[in-house]
Amino acid sequence: MGCAVGALSCLFEFAPFVVLRGAHYLSVFTVEQLQALAYMFLRLGGQAGNIGLVFFALHCLLVGYLILRSTFLPRIVGVLMAFAGMGWLTLLWPPLANYLSPYNMIPGLLGEGSLTLWLLVMGVNVQRWKEQASAAGASIRT
């Protein structure tokens, strides 16, 4: 959902170019009205991007929870991912997000960065993965 909202928010960033390009059908508007409309689209794009980040915050919280429950990755990575989700959730209340900015972005950098680095360098514990997969397969057969 966050990716879809983020993709749609890009349309709002493209809209000012359409409004300000000077098409004939826009001649009914004054220059000030067109500039105000372009500015509104830019502001709306920023708000839509923040909505997409709120969905991303929920994603980070869920990934953090799943990592905490699993035994494939270190629990600290799960804690950092949950912490990242909390940082992104500050965007639910723009005055708080503006007050905490840019510090509310640091948890995202730590959580997502730690998960990315862990997966790139160490990977998933394959032995535990196979053990749990065979145990799950055995419980399904019985």
Image: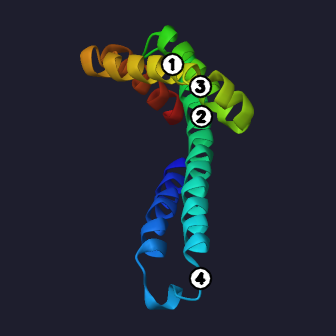
**Tag 4: Cα neighbours inside 10 Å, few (<14), some, or many (≥20)?**
few
Question: In which quadrant of the rendered image does the C terminus lie?
Answer: top right
- Tag 2: residue type? Ala
Mark 3 element type? loop
Residue 101 in picture, x, y percent from top left:
59, 25
Residue denoted by label 3: 101
The residue tagged 1 is 106
Check the image and report above or below for 57 versus 126: below
Q: Nearer the viewer, mark 4 or mark 3?
A: 4
- Examine the image and state in which quarter residue 134 appears: top left
What's the distance in space between the residues labelled 3 and 1, CA to CA?
Answer: 9 Å
Q: Is residue 133 left or right of residue 27?
A: left
30 or 75: which is nearer to us? 30
Whether residue 116 is visible, yes or no, is: yes
What crowding class fits label 2: few (fewer than 14 Cα within 10 Å), some (14-19), or many (20 or more)?
many
Which residue position holds label 4? 29
